[in-house]
Structure formats: structure tokens, C-alpha cells
Image (spheres, rainbow, N blue to C red):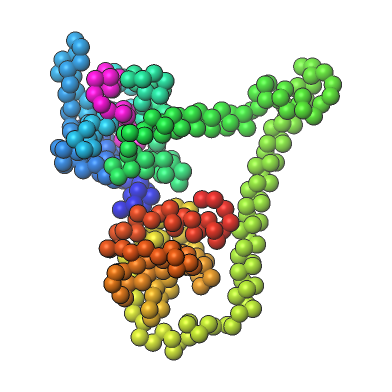
Amino acid sequence: MPLADALPKLKSTAERVVTRLETEEATKMSLVVPFLRELGFDPFDPDVVVPEFTADVGTKKGEKVDYALKQNDQIIMLIECKTANADLRDAHYGQLFRYFSVTEARVGVLTNGIEYWFFSDVDEKNKLDNRPFYRFSLFEFNDADVKQLEQFTSRSFDPRHFDETASLLKYTTLLKKEIREELNKPSEDLVKLFASKVYNGRLTANTKEMFAPLVFNAFTEIIREIVNARLTHALSQVNSDESKKAETTAVSEEDTEASKEGIVTTDQEREAYFIVKSIARRFVDADRISLRDHKSYCNVLLDSTNRKPVVRFLFDNQPQRVQFGKDPARRVEISGVDDIFRHEHAIKEVLSEYDGVAY
């Protein structure tokens, strides 16, 4: 199951049971183990997930970390679990720091089953940072969070290129935090920066005090204008499509009742449609995606219009193929519908082309 579909179910389960999880073991079995499984790490395969991982570290003999995750027989992540009601800011996790320096692990994760804090050695090589480079909360996440979490799934995690990933996540997170704080309450430095660009006089304390709310209001209005522009663009696209639809024949030849005779939507086509929809909903509203079957092919459409085919299924002949968008040159062979999961980028590209925005 795609991570975007699995996480809401995990969230629902967590909300239902979290108040009854009073021990670390209960937290691990109810929340952490299912989470690892959705990341693609089989908790029942000791070659993938090693519980109660032990490594002698200096004078600390027999100390354990809750889980070690392995990939190609190499330890890539260490996980330390706390009870579901634990505040991770107050949690002790010295094992992660000690184990990180003596194993090949690239990531240390501290979790209470709800929050997952990811640590690495961004600041100093082979020494776990004091601050996480990425935080994920099962109770509060969006599409961007899901995409970032995808980088830690067993199919996507690449220890060879992880340093750059960790650095980007860390500094992006810190920058977003600083920007939010500046938007909510512009600092004196920011007020001074913008005031000096528009005000020719001397920036006295009273002048800066006058400009502080002006800077705040300007930021607020710019954000509102950007949002309104996006909404206006989306509405204009819908209106344009409706106008074009009205100008064409009311019912095209391929949609007449006569042309529908003998059309049977197979289970394979339905399964492929649900896969495409699960991918597309990461970028557009799910209700914009629909299925339309024809005698020799089956289309997944955006906005229910034949002018916006997202994926075309060509399953009647061997080898079976799928086509992305309108261009036959974008056809690829597949051995089964699960192969469609490997073409998320192509689906995203088609949606971006139709909506005129970068997803």
C-alpha cells in the first residue's frame, strides 16, 4: 500500500489506542512495528529488523537499542523507542549516540510511536547531532511530509547519498522555522532591511517601530495574493475547459451508446486505475481523477475530459503497455500493474503539464 494511503490508517489507529499505551513494549507493538512495516521493513524478518540490538560500546557492555534496520546485510538505521506519552524533548537516548559511532548506521531515530525524530552526523562526521535533521508526527502531517518520509522507506533509502539528503532536510527545516517566525513577528533586522530599501530618512527607533506592522501586513498581503492567484488560475482553467466542452459536439463519437457496446472494464484495469489514482492524489484532488473505458484501451482522465489523459492502459495485447499523457512516444511496457508504482514521476509530469504548475 502506498505510504500516502497507509499513514492516515496508522494515524486513526494511534488516535484510538494512544491513551492505553503505558509501556514501551505496548508502544512498540501497537505503533512502531506497524510504522516500520509501512516503511517497507518487515519486522518479522531478522535479516531486516533486528530487535534489542546489542553492541558493546566502551565501558557500556550489553546495552541495547530497540531496533536496528538492515539493508543488504548492512545496518542503516537505529531506533530508540519511548512510551507513547513520553515527551521526546526530555527523553534520554544516549544509546543512539554511542551506537551511531560504532556501527555503519546512517540514521538514528528517537520515537514515542507518534513523533519520529531523525538524527544523523550533519554537523560533525561520525558523531550524532544533538538536534534532529527531520521530524515527522503521525498526528500532524501533509503531502510534503509524506514525500520526505518516503526517502526513509526500504525501497528509497540510499546510504551512499544520504549525507546530502540529511543536510538538505535539516537546513530546509531550520529555514522554514525561521521564515515562519519572521512572518508571524518580523525581527528588528528584517524590519530594518526592508525599511532601508523604501525609506530615505534615518532609521530611528520610532521609525523602525512604525515599519514593523507595515512589514508584517505586507508579508500577509503578498501571501494572500499568491494564494488568490493560484485559485484564480485554477478556476480559469476549469472555465476554459467548460467553454471548450460546450463548443464541441455534445457527445463525441467514442462516448455514444453505440460505441460503448461490448466494452468491459476488467479487474486488471480497475486495479491499475486505483494505483494511478493513489499516486495522482498526492498532487491533485482525488475527485479530479476518473476512469473512462473504450474498446481497445482504457483512459485515466484529469477533470473527466478526453483532452487530459493522464495514463492510458493498453492491456489487450502482449506485451502490455501504459502511455503517459497524449504522446504515444511516452509508452512503456509493464509486466504487471504494480510496475506503475515505478512511474510516479511520469504521472506527476503529466499533471504538471495540464495544470501549468510544478508539482
- Residue 70 part of the magenta-drawn span: no
275 left or right of 51 in image: right
Residue 95 screen position, x and y as percent:
26, 20
x and y, in percent, of residue 196 in the image: 77, 24
Give the x, y percent position of residue 227.
63, 48
Res 174 visible: yes
Compared to residue 298, the image places residue 107 above or below, namely above
Q: Nearer the viewer, residue 54 or 12?
A: 54
Residue at screen point 30% across, 53% down: 1
Q: Nearer the viewer, residue 114 or 291?
A: 291
Residue 12 visible to an observer of this rendering: no
Residue at the image point whose x is 20% and y is 12% from the top: 58
Q: Which residue lies furthest to the right in this view?
A: 201
Question: Up-down: is 318 above or below 178?
Answer: below
> What residue is drawn where x is 66% and y is 27%?
186
Span shown in magenta: 96-117
Q: Residue at x 31, y 76 (%)?
A: 316
Q: Is 72 drawn above or below residue 236 in the view shown?
A: above
Whole-percent x, y for residue 66 in the image: 22, 29
Q: In which quarter of the image is residue 319?
A: bottom left
Q: Image height check: is 254 above or below 271? A: below
Instruction: Count every numbered label the image shows and give the total.
Output: 0
Residue furthest to the front in view is 329
Q: State which quadrant residue 110 falls in.
A: top left
Give the residue furthest to the bottom.
Answer: 258
Residue furthest top in the image: 59
Say if the magenta span includes residue 115.
yes
Q: Which of these two is toward me, 318 or 205?
A: 318
